[in-house]
Amino acid sequence: MKNLLEKRDLTTPKFASKRNSFLAVFVLFFLFSCEEAVKPKPKAYLALEYPEAEYDKVSSNCPYTFQVNRNSVVKPARSGNPCWIDIEYPDMKGTIFITYQPVRDNLKKLLIDAQKLPLEHTIKADEIEGDTYINDKHKTYGTFYEVKGDAASQAQFYLTDSTDHFLTGSIYFRAKPNFDSIVPAAAYLQKDIRHLMETVEWK
């Protein structure tokens, strides 16, 4: 029995070293547990707040004018067509692509093509809503499409006077589609698109 007790005696050097190690680990655990838990760094999302929009009229040699947000940068489109423009939002990594085509006995085809474009996103989109737009004063008629879900484009539109002019636009972000992360930016740009549509005038 004596030998057995000696082996279980925690005061012997062998057990004492283990006990000290155990106490040290316990103290360290207690100290760190009192601090705020370390959280993983969240994924980088776009900012949730943006400056109040102010608009200026775009001047060009093209047969249309409209107003754009001062926080955007208007650039010629890469296509080389002088009346196609890109409205870029550097802080949001987003762009509104604007295209223009004259109507030359091809209005039906232009309408079909414009209405097909939102449908290309049905695989990723959760929902696509279309709002008809009519402005008799400016002779602008068309549709605004809001695309919900992880689609590449979150909004599109087309406008025409039904006789001479046909204008289209679409929003794209330079990021992998993730609807939850771009909702604020998409809503901001959708508001700008609606304002653009409301201010379109034909020359």
Image: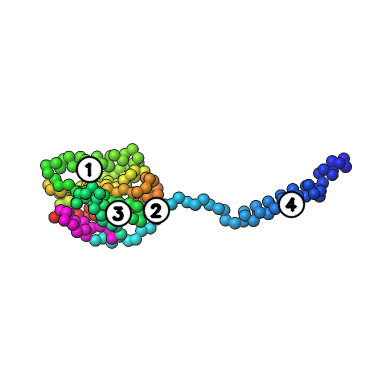
Left or right side of 152 for 104: left
Question: Alpha-carbon distance for marks 4 and 1?
Answer: 76 Å
Q: Residue 99 at x, y = what percent? A: 22, 48
Label of residue 137 in the image: none
Q: Earlier in the sequence, mark 2 or mark 4?
A: 4
Numbered disc 2: secondary structure: loop
From the image, state whether disc 4 or disc 1 is nearer to you: 4
* Amino acid type of the residue that numbered disc 1 sits on in the rendered structure: Ala
Left or right side of 50 for 66: left
Residue drawn at x 71%, y 52% as measured from the top left: 23
Q: Is 3 drawn above or below residue 191 in the view shown?
A: above
Residue drawn at x 78%, y 47% as measured from the top left: 14
Question: Alpha-carbon distance for marks 3 and 4?
Answer: 64 Å
Label of residue 114 in the image: 1
Residue drawn at x 82%, y 46% as measured from the top left: 9
Asked if one can make out residue 136 in the rendered structure from this viewpoint, the answer is no
From the image, state whether disc 2 or disc 4 is nearer to you: 4
Magenta-drawn segment: 57-70
Q: Which residue is mark 3?
A: 88
Left or right side of 88 for 64: left
- Do residues under tags 3 and 1 come within 8 Å of each other at their CB atoms? no
Q: Which residue is mark 4?
A: 20
* Amino acid type of the residue that numbered disc 4 sits on in the rendered structure: Asn
- Do residues under tags 2 and 4 come within 8 Å of each other at their CB atoms? no
- Do residues under tags 4 and 1 come within 8 Å of each other at their CB atoms? no
Q: Residue 157 at x, y = what percent? A: 24, 47
